[in-house]
């Protein structure tokens, strides 16, 4: 059995960092030693401000409903983070059938329907009536764009085990759209406009759904050719057009541009990851405080704009962002050209992360109880979450992440927690929930009209019971309803 000292030595943490190869030391141990006696520039002190006090207006067929499917063992990568012989994203490490079951489960429970085709019919009809004022469902000439988070993918072939949205999750969503929602393959666009889409994902989808379109930021490479067509005919790069307005009065040159292909889409599925955005210390990966606290559906659209870096200043609490200040995430979510097209919000929680680009994290507390020592073990969060209310979904995601920072084992031998939540983590959720009268006082405007509430924000009662106001009072509750199902 691996002991604690062997684990520290293996992962390049703390005082034994010199025992690992120099290429790992340069990115981990040396930086950790440098920071051993220093404090992060940012405060990592976020805590929920209040429990079971919902704000905002709940959205969805069942307002405020968030569905969480948890299938322990569905993700079972061995955690050998330094080896690329069997990376986490392969089917041998992630059970496609169980992921498919989880995705199907959240779709039916969100809609209240038992059959997949009826579930999608209800979802499209609700969106069209509430947003587009049309009494109809999906029509087969309409494009469905699926925004995925590929923030750790900087080349087509992955060279490390950093996490992104899993191929198995994307495959399950595409299968649902084609087989049950009636969306033609060539009317589906899977994209991240600011990153590559890695080959393991495109090949997996194309093997069964050969006409699905993919879009990435940069030129295609020879090894990205389609396995059936043997060309790049189903690959695209963004055609950037000006489409986003920001309510702080700044006319951003690049942040206002989105891909023309996304502008032409009728619907969007926001498929993000359940992860933090910042972790200041160097353990397995280089410490990086990033720009904000969490990356879920709210920030996922930074991959839908040409110039996300133009918005970093107003997001970063070390720069312009202070408590109760303007958030550009409200404008991205409220824009008719982008966020208002969203029919479904999803969080891939198969392999979660502690910062924007990092290795997968084990979750030690309820309801996961993953082993986190030694790191190389096959226990992972193995979850899929979804909602028709993006504010509610990110609120639940934040509660989950915060719950896993409790009682962290001192794995790096330097009195550092395994995962942290940065300050002001839910400020953007307050701004979204109360967009018509936000804490910042910003007058959020889109197309000449004031933005109204984008969803409901609330924190659960405890990490063990995980109940929100609609769970506590189904008849009179005004906030979130969380449906949790453990799938064996």
Image (cartoon, helix red, strand yellow):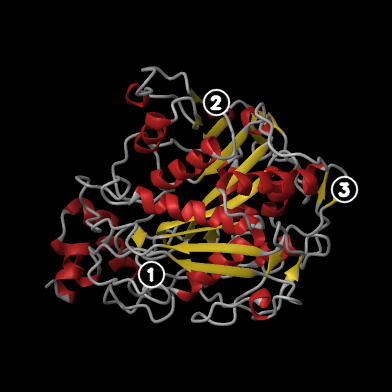
Select label 2 or label 3 by which is in front. 2
Please tell me which of labels 2 and 3 falls first in the chain: 2
C-alpha distance separating marks 2 and 1 = 38 Å
Quarter of the image containing the C terminus?
bottom left
* Label 3 Cα neighbours within 10 Å, binned few <14 / some 14-19 / many ≥20: few
Q: Kindly state the secondary structure of the residue where label 1 is placed.
A: loop
* Label 1 Cα neighbours within 10 Å, binned few <14 / some 14-19 / many ≥20: many
Select label 2 or label 1 by which is in front. 2
Q: Quadrant of residue 223?
A: top left
Left or right: 74, with 311 as reference point: left
Q: Position of residue 64 (x, y in %)?
A: 68, 64
Q: Nearer the viewer, residue 323 or 229?
A: 229
| Count of numbered marks | 3
Quarter of the image containing the N terminus?
bottom left
Q: Position of residue 434 (x, y in %)?
A: 77, 64
Select label 3 or label 1 by which is in front. 1
C-alpha distance separating marks 3 and 1 = 43 Å
Against 123, is 473 above or below? below
Residue holding disc 1: 363
Residue 110 appears in the picture as rendered: yes
* Label 2 Cα neighbours within 10 Å, binned few <14 / some 14-19 / many ≥20: some
Q: Residue at x 82, y 57 (%)?
A: 452
Residue 150 appears in the picture as rendered: no
Residue holding disc 2: 186
Contact check, label 3 and label 1, Cβ < 8 Å: no
Against 33, is 77 above or below? above
C-alpha distance separating marks 2 and 3 = 34 Å
Left or right: 160, with 234 as reference point: left
Q: Kindly state the secondary structure of the residue where label 2 is placed.
A: helix
Residue holding disc 3: 449
């Amino acid at each position: 059995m691996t002991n604690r000292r062997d684990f520290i030595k293996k992962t390049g943490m703390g005082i034994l960092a010199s025992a690992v190869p120099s290429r790992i030391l340069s990115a981990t141990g040396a930086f950790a030693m440098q920071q051993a006696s220093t404090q992060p520039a940012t405060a990592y002190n976020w805590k929920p401000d209040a429990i079971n006090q919902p704000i905002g207006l709940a959205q969805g067929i069942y307002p405020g409903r968030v569905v969480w499917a948890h299938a322990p063992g569905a993700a079972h990568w061995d955690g050998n983070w330094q080896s690329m012989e069997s990376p986490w994203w392969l089917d041998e490490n992630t059970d496609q059938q169980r992921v498919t079951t989880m995705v199907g489960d959240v779709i039916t429970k969100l809609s209240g329907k038992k059959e997949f085709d009826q579930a999608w019919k209800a979802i499209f009809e609700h969106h069209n009536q509430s947003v587009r004022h049309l009494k109809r469902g999906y029509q087969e000439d309409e494009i469905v764009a699926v925004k995925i988070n590929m923030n750790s993918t900087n080349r087509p072939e992955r060279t490390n085990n950093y996490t992104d949205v899993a191929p198995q999750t994307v495959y399950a969503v595409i299968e649902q759209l084609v087989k049950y929602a009636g969306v033609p393959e060539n009317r589906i666009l899977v994209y991240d406009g600011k990153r590559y889409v890695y080959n393991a994902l495109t090949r997996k989808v194309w093997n069964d759904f050969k006409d699905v379109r993919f879009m990435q930021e940069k030129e295609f490479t020879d090894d990205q050719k389609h396995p059936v067509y043997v060309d790049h005919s189903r690959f695209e790069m963004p055609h950037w057009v000006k489409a986003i307005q920001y309510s702080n009065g700044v006319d951003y040159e690049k942040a206002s541009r989105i891909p023309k292909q996304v502008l032409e889409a009728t619907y969007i599925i926001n498929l993000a990851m359940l992860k933090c955005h910042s972790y200041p210390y160097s353990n397995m990966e280089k410490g990086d405080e990033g720009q904000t606290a969490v990356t879920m559906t709210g920030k996922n659209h930074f991959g839908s704009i040409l110039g996300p870096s133009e918005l970093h200043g107003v997001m970063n609490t070390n720069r312009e962002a202070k408590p109760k200040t303007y958030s550009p995430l409200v404008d991205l979510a409220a824009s008719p050209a982008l966020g208002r097209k969203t029919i479904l919000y999803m969080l891939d929680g198969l392999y979660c992360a502690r910062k924007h680009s990092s290795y997968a994290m084990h979750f030690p507390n309820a309801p996961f109880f993953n082993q986190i020592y030694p790191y190389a073990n096959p226990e992972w969060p193995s979850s899929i979450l979804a909602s028709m209310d993006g504010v509610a979904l990110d609120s639940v995601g934040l509660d989950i992440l915060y719950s896993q920072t409790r009682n962290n084992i001192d794995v790096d031998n330097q009195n550092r927690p395994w995962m942290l939540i940065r300050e002001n983590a839910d400020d953007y959720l307050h701004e979204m929930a109360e967009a018509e009268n936000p804490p910042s006082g910003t007058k959020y405007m889109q197309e000449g009209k004031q933005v109204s509430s984008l969803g409901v924000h609330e924190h659960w009662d405890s990490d063990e019971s995980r109940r929100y106001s609609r769970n506590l009072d189904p008849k009179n509750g005004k906030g979130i309803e969380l449906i949790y199902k453990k799938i064996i």
